[in-house]
Amino acid sequence: MKILFLDIDGVLNSQNWYKSEVYEEARSKFKKREPADGSERTAFELHTCHIDPDALCLLKNCIRDLGLSLVLSSTWRTLPTALDALEQAGLSFIGMTPEMPEISSARGREIQAWLDKNSIVGDFAILDDNDDLEDLRPHLIQTYFCTGFTAREARELRERFDGSIQSGA
Ligand SMILES: [Mg+2]
C-alpha cells in the first residue's frame, strides 16, 4: 500500500491561487452576500473556493497513476463542511490522523500516532508546506505556501513512489 498523508493549506491552495483572477471571481459572489449568512451551504462553498483546481488536478493525476491511498492530516479534517468540499473535489480518504493539539510538533506526532495504530505494509510520504515532523521529516515532500502543489512536487512524488518521471505530471 502506498500512503500519502495530505495537508491542504499551502498544498491545494497558495499565495498564487489567492492572487489569481479565478479565485477572485469565485470569491466575489460571496462578497455580495456578506456578512456571510453562516449557513452550512455558504461554509461549504467557501471551502470549495480555497481549493485551487490546477493543484487539485495535478494531485489527482498523481494519486491515480501511483495508486495512492490518502490520509488527511490537515486541520480541514476537523470541519465537516471542509470535508464535504474535499469529497466534492473528488478526494477520498482511508483515514484521518488523530488530533493532538496539546503537543508541539503536533503534525509529526499525529502522523506517527496514525502509523502506530494502523499497521501498513508499504511506503508512505507526507505532503505538507510545514516541516514540523521530527523523525518523519525524511518522508516529507514539501510544498511552499507561495506556490502550493506544482509540477515540481508532482515529479518528486512520482520519483518517490515509482522512480520514474512521466509526462503530463
Ligand atoms: Mg499547510
Image (cartoon, helix red, strand yellow):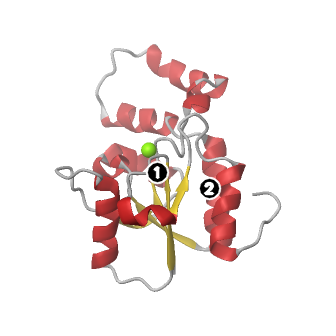
- For the point 30% across and 46% down, the residue is 79
Looking at the picture, tell me which residue is in the foreground, 165 or 64.
165
Q: Earlier in the sequence, mark 1 or mark 2?
A: 2
Q: In this rendering, is residue 76 above or below 3?
A: above
According to the picture, the residue beneath numbered tag 1 turns out to be 86
- Tell me: residue 145, above or below residue 89: above
Q: Is any atom of residue 97 visible in this view? A: no
Q: Quadrant of the C terminus?
A: bottom right
The image shows residue 42 at horizontal and vertical percentages of 38, 31
Q: Mark 2: few, some, or many residues within 10 Å (few <14, many ≥20)?
A: many
Q: Is residue 12 visible?
A: yes
Residue ID for mark 2:
59
| Amino acid beneath label 1 | Leu
The residue carrying pointer 1 sits among few (fewer than 14), some (14 to 19) or many (20 or more) residues within 10 Å by Cα, namely many
Which amino acid type is marked by label 2? Leu
Q: Secondary structure at mark 1?
A: helix
Q: Secondary structure at mark 2?
A: helix
Pick the front one: 61 or 119: 119
